[in-house]
Amino acid sequence: MQIIKTDFPELLIFEPAVHRDARGFFLETFREEHFARLGIDFHCVQANQSFSAECGVLRGLHFQKPPKAQAKLVWVTRGEVLDVVVDMRPDSPTWGRHFSLRLSEANFRRLFVPKGFAHGYLTLTPETEFNYMVDAYYAPDHEGGVLWNDPELGIDWPLEQISATAPILSEKDKKLPLFSELKNVFQTPGQI
């Protein structure tokens, strides 16, 4: 397993060793000791999978607010997505910046998203399966999000590459607030 650090503290890319033969392939999806070696406390309590039938589905940008914040390990088992995260941690040197990465069934990459990030993805192929493991249970009363096309974030969603003029969004995601309205969501207690 190759672990690639990004410019964002604790945001990591995992490239698993893929063992192929005439039957197909085998790889480790997750190994907790890789996180422990890096000083990251990540214990999966829930695993989720989503399916998007069409190209151009955009899910996000989502997060869970403290004290129910989630760290995630995400990857694609069918198709391809542009995965995007926004650092919402006010004490972080990358606060307010976004990071994007293509995840696909072909590249086997996994992205570890620490607590304090908004997360979303755009399907670049039809019939896309997206998987994620989280370290805190889903808590609907703590869910939040950032509007996908907030001009302050400047995210370049490759809609033109998939011949789309607009993404396919849920009604909830169409109404998410701007980043400027959420700047203190992950504020450390006592700093406000």
Image (cartoon, rainbow, N blue to C red):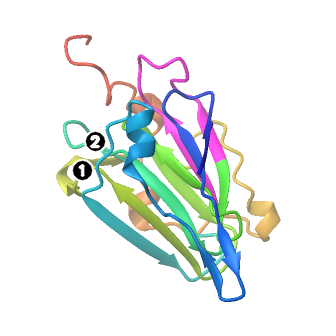
Q: Are marks 1 and 2 in contact (CB under 8 Å)?
A: yes
Select label 1 or label 2 by which is in front.
1
Residue 83 lies within the magenta run: yes
For badge 2, the amino acid type reads Ala
Magenta region, residue range? 82-100
Q: Which residue is mark 2?
A: 69
Q: 10 Å neighbourhood of mark 1: few (<14), some, or many (≥20)? A: some
Residue 76 lies within the magenta run: no
Check residue 94 in the rendering and tell me which mark sits there, or answer none. none
Say what secondary structure mark 1 lies in: loop
The relative height of residue 39 versus residue 189 in the rendered view (above or below) is below
Q: Which residue is mark 1?
A: 136
Report the label total.
2
Cα gap from disc 1 to disc 2, whole angstroms? 7 Å
Left or right of 158 in this view: 77: left
Q: Residue at x 28, y 42 (%)?
A: 69
Q: Is residue 177 visible?
A: no
> Looking at this view, is 40 or 185 the one in front?
40
Left or right of 39 in this view: 86: right
Image coordinates of residue 121 in percent, x first then y, are 56, 58
The relative height of residue 85 versus residue 44 in the rendered view (above or below) is above
> Looking at this view, is 74 or 87 the one in front?
74
Image coordinates of residue 188 in percent, x first then y, are 27, 19
Q: Residue at x 41, y 72 (%)?
A: 49
Say what secondary structure mark 2 lies in: loop
Residue furthest to the top in view is 191
Q: Earlier in the sequence, mark 1 or mark 2?
A: 2
For badge 1, the amino acid type reads Ala
The relative height of residue 92 versus residue 103 in the rendered view (above or below) is above
